Image (cartoon, rainbow, N blue to C red):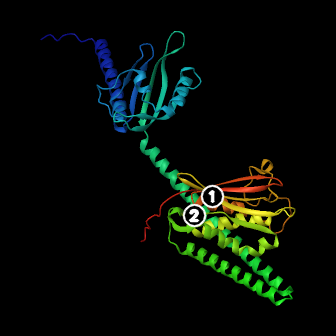
Amino acid sequence: MKFPSLSLKNYKSNRYKNGTTSECSLEDEKHRIALELSNVGLWDWNIITNKVFYSKESKQIIGYAENELKNTSEFWDNKVHEDDKESYYSDFNSLLDGKIDLYEHEYRIQCKNGSYKWILDKGKIAKRDHKGKPSRIIGTHTDITTTKNSEAQLKKNLQLITSQNKRLYSFTHIVSHNLNTHIGNLKNILEFYDEAKEESEKKELIGHLRSISESLTTTIVDLDDIISIKSKVNLHQFNEHINLHSCISKISESLTLDSTKNEVTIHNALRQDETLFSNRSYLESVFYNIISNGIKYADPNKKSQIVIQSIHTKDTIKILISDNGIGIDTAKFKDQLFDMYQTFHGTDRKDSRGIGLYITKTQVEALNGEIELESKLNEGTAFILTFKKQKALVSDQA
């Protein structure tokens, strides 16, 4: 029996050829499976024909079936969020212009149902024409919506923790600043009492002593209340119904000795039914610091006065506390007005620790309010406090 001749050369060649093809197919299949398992989409843009291949995964990311998404670059481009388009085009053009080797950009894209997802888009030039210009770019799409949402929540939590730390830091200064002020007032009254010769004068000073004592007691009680309150997420949950006119009157009364000594008249021009839902301790501290500053820095050459009034808008109430004191050079100190340990009056006062405005701003912001300062040297100062109007909130522990 005669066997057919066998060419080892052809056998090796065919075997090598078949083996190579299998290996290439296997590599392609591995890449395809890896992309599918990782939910990473693949895109392939032929710049000459302006045709784009979008893989099944790319289409699925934005909610389209395989036969629904048009294979053009414009289709995808038009779905990029308007706020992200400028940077989207800018980065991609940098790749086309040869400024970068790898395009990598995060942006929002509209899904079929109208919602938006965050995409990490990457691309690299795969082929160039005879002039060296890009003719084909291959890239990937990765859905990073979950990561972005986690980052946003982390940022929100960080802001909350920072805000809580600021309030805690502010609270420690409320204790030292306000108590030291009351103690200083008590010390002054006792010194005046020792120097007084007339019984009527001593009787008047005892009245002031009682007023300061009551104010001190109230401050201690309020501070103790804050300490005893269990963890609250936001200070706007401390929703006491506060009569602003009564609040200002109470503070003015506690400052009678200082205002009389400095010949400063306090005009409470708020309506008697003016109210605000807020945190009483913080709000009283804000008013106290601003009014006492107005007294402290009164101009001895003027008939000094402090005026408290309000302006209402649909959603806010603005409380204006203005004086005609020595004022501040805001052009010189505009970037330092609410910084800690800053003084601006050039009076070399030992009782000016440069902490009052910092505390006041921190407290106002903790109450979800805003504070502005307008001042002119030798003319006076005006503080504008803006708070949102709100109804009483239901207590979590009611």
Image-quadrant location for residue 307: bottom right
Q: Secondary structure at mark 1?
A: strand
Q: Earlier in the sequence, mark 2 or mark 1?
A: 2
Q: Give the residue type at disc 2.
A: Glu
| Nearest the eye: 186 or 59 | 186
Q: Give the residue type at disc 1.
A: Ser
Q: Which mark is residue 282?
A: none
Q: Position of residue 392 (x, y in %)?
A: 47, 64
Visible residue check, residue 267: yes
| Residue positioned most to the left | 1
Real-space Cα distance between discs 2 and 1? 9 Å
Q: Residues within 10 Å of mark 2 (few under 14, many from 20)?
A: few
Quadrant containing the N terminus is: top left
Residue lying at 77% horizontally and 66% vertically, measured from the top left: 295
Determine whether label 2 and label 1 are within 8 Å by CB: yes
Q: Position of residue 98 (x, y in %)?
A: 57, 21
Name the residue beneath numbered marker 2.
Answer: 274
Image-quadrant location for residue 270: bottom right
Name the residue beneath numbered marker 1.
Answer: 310
Is 194 left or right of 130, judged from the image as shown? right
| Nearest the eye: 343 or 247 | 247
Is 248 left or right of 26, judged from the image as shown? right
| Nearest the eye: 154 or 231 | 231
